[in-house]
């Protein structure tokens, strides 16, 4: 089976952020989709091993920053390959931050969608969070980064907690 064909599904690269007792935390996700237009609702899939997962459950809110093809690769490094479970890890230390609807957002992105958590579904290794959109702000008109672009052009790897993680041969 050639599981790399899953890279051809059309999805983006996103920084999912929230709060952990006043500290901005987040992770990289590639599984975000709009569910309904009215009320505007989206779904986000986050690995249960990601520290951000529990923070979303506790705070009951989250933000989705849509990365661009020009977004600084340090964003993916900070949010995709470090854990905020370590209190010394400050994911926004080298990444510009904006506050939108009182939620942390990545400044170097197309924009952000903020949500209040209205439901969650256990999917084994991941939780699907359903959020009602509370706000949206555009930061840039740059092309959004797709997962295909991330693998094909940036030559990026998927962290082990990504839904599309493939062990190296």
Image (tube, rainbow, N blue to C red):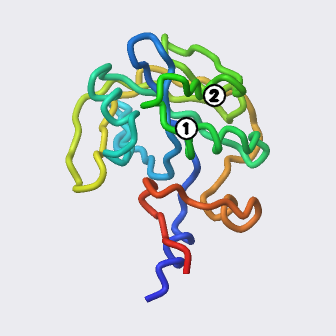
Which is nearer the eye, 138 or 1? 1
Q: Position of residue 110 (x, y in %)?
A: 68, 35
| 140 versus 12 height, above or below | above
| Circle 1/circle 2 CB separation < 8 Å | yes
Q: Secondary structure at mark 2?
A: strand
Q: CA distance from mark 1 to mark 2?
A: 7 Å
* Quadrant for the C terminus in the image: bottom right
- Residue where numbered disc 1 is placed: 15
User: Going 60% across and 39% down the picture, which residue do you hit?
Assistant: 66
| 64 versus 34 height, above or below | above
Total labels drawn: 2
User: Which numbered marker is on residue 96?
Assistant: none
Q: Position of residue 11 (x, y in %)?
A: 53, 57
Q: Position of residue 135 (x, y in %)?
A: 48, 21
In the rendered structure, the answer to whether residue 137 lies left or right of residue 51 reads right
- Residue where numbered disc 2 is placed: 106
Give the class, few, some or many, for how many residues have Cα within 10 Å of label 1's Cα (few <14, many ≥20): many
In the rendered structure, the answer to whether residue 115 lies left or right of residue 122 reads right
| 151 versus 51 height, above or below | below
């Amino acid at each position: 089976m050639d599981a790399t064909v899953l890279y051809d599904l059309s999805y983006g690269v996103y920084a999912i952020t929230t709060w952990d007792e006043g500290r901005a935390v987040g992770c990289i996700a590639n599984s975000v989709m709009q569910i309904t237009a009215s009320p505007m609702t989206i779904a986000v899939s986050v690995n249960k091993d990601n520290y951000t997962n529990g923070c979303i459950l506790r705070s009951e809110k989250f933000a989705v920053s849509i990365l661009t093809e020009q977004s600084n690769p340090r964003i993916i490094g900070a949010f995709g390959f470090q854990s905020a479970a370590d209190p010394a890890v400050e994911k926004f230390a080298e990444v510009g931050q904006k506050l939108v609807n009182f939620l942390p957002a990545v400044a170097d992105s197309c924009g952000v969608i903020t949500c209040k958590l209205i439901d969650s579904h256990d999917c084994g290794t991941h939780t699907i969070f359903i959020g009602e959109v509370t706000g949206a702000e555009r930061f840039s008109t740059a092309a959004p980064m797709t997962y295909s672009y991330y693998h094909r052009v940036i030559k990026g790897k998927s962290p082990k907690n990504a839904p599309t993680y493939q062990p190296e041969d």
